[in-house]
Image (cartoon, rainbow, N blue to C red):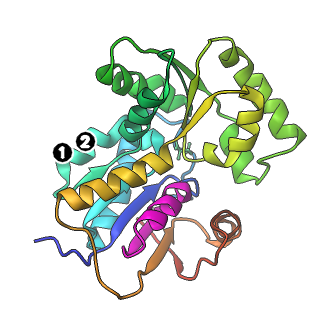
Amino acid sequence: MTNTDNPIGIFDSGIGGLTVLKEVRRILPAEDLIYLGDTARVPYGIRSPETVLRYSFECTEFLMRQGIKLLVIACNTVSATSLSALQAELPIPVVGVIEPGARAAVNSTKCKRIGIIGTEATIKSSAYLKAITSLDHDMEVFGLACPLFVPLVEEGWTEGAIARMIGEKYLGPMRDKGTDTLVLGCTHYPLLKGMIQEVMGNIALIDSAVETAKTVAEVLVGNGILRRGERPAAEMFHVTDSPEKFVAVGERFLQRKIERIERVKL
Ligand code: DGL
């Protein structure tokens, strides 16, 4: 029997999944959260689906040992390549980021033309294309990999001339596709929202993190495992490389202290 007091596990290849944790915390303040960032092996987005799948199982096994009641795959690359395998194996609900983002995009577009930006692995998998066209097969979907966006965010260069120049180079061709909705299909991209909006002009940006957090809430309620009660919620962070950089960038992003963090071996 799942205990409603058990934590939610959130996993990402690195720091980007904090965009999802932040939203989950915002709408589910009573839930205990355990975060795992596989910082020793980030980025996943340039690796083969087989390697991403293997890493995903290793991360998941670690979180299952912590007694989680629900798993959130915060990483788009993992969601795109490994979600169904993880759902088939695990005895708990598993929520990925692709389906919630796809649903929000379909609801947003008026002209039925949607752009997707993400890592090479996510775009190659066509996972967003499949999720969007399964909701409405009249949709036209344009995928674009923006591999330099991840290191840009990791470096903290989310605005200014360099970010803008790289954004212009990648997104210029996307602007010509006549889309009215663009899915930020990578954990890191919500941190570049300002620059992306500036480059793309008048277009709706879909942040999968916000949509995923809503889905997590629905799944908790649907399974009767939403945590109520007065005890203040706890948060624990785990990383597979040294925590210093994660803490520095993570605290800046979350705008609060990361109190409990430890380096783990998977
Ligand atoms: N977390 C990955 C994603 O959302 C981006 C970083 C990586 O390539 O590992 O696709």
Calculate the distance from the C-alpha at mark 1 to the C-alpha at mark 2: 5 Å
Q: Are marks 1 and 2 in contact (CB under 8 Å)?
A: yes
Q: Nearer the viewer, residue 72 or 232?
A: 232
| Above or below, comparing residue 28 to residue 181 in the picture | below
Residue range of the region highlighted in magenta in the rendering: 17-36
86 vs 9, nearest the viewer? 9
Where's residue 88, x and y in %? 18, 45
Q: Residue furthest left?
A: 1
Q: Quadrant of the N terminus?
A: bottom left
Tell me the number on the disc at residue 85.
Answer: 2
Residue 96 position, x and y percent, is 36, 46
User: Which residue is painted at 44% across and 51% down in the image?
Assistant: 74
Residue named by callout 1 = 88
Disc tally is 2
Q: Amino acid at mark 2?
A: Ala
In-image side of 253 versus 108 (left or right): right
Q: Secondary structure at mark 2?
A: helix
Give amino acid for label 1: Ala
Quarter of the image for residue 229 reads: bottom left
Q: Is residue 221 above or below residue 87?
A: below
Q: Left or right of 10: which side holds 175?
A: right
Q: Position of residue 19 (x, y in %)?
A: 55, 55
Whether residue 25 appears in magenta in the rendering, the answer is yes
Return the residue nearer the eye: 222 or 125.
222
Is residue 124 rendered to the left or right of residue 231? right
Quadrant showing the C terminus: bottom left
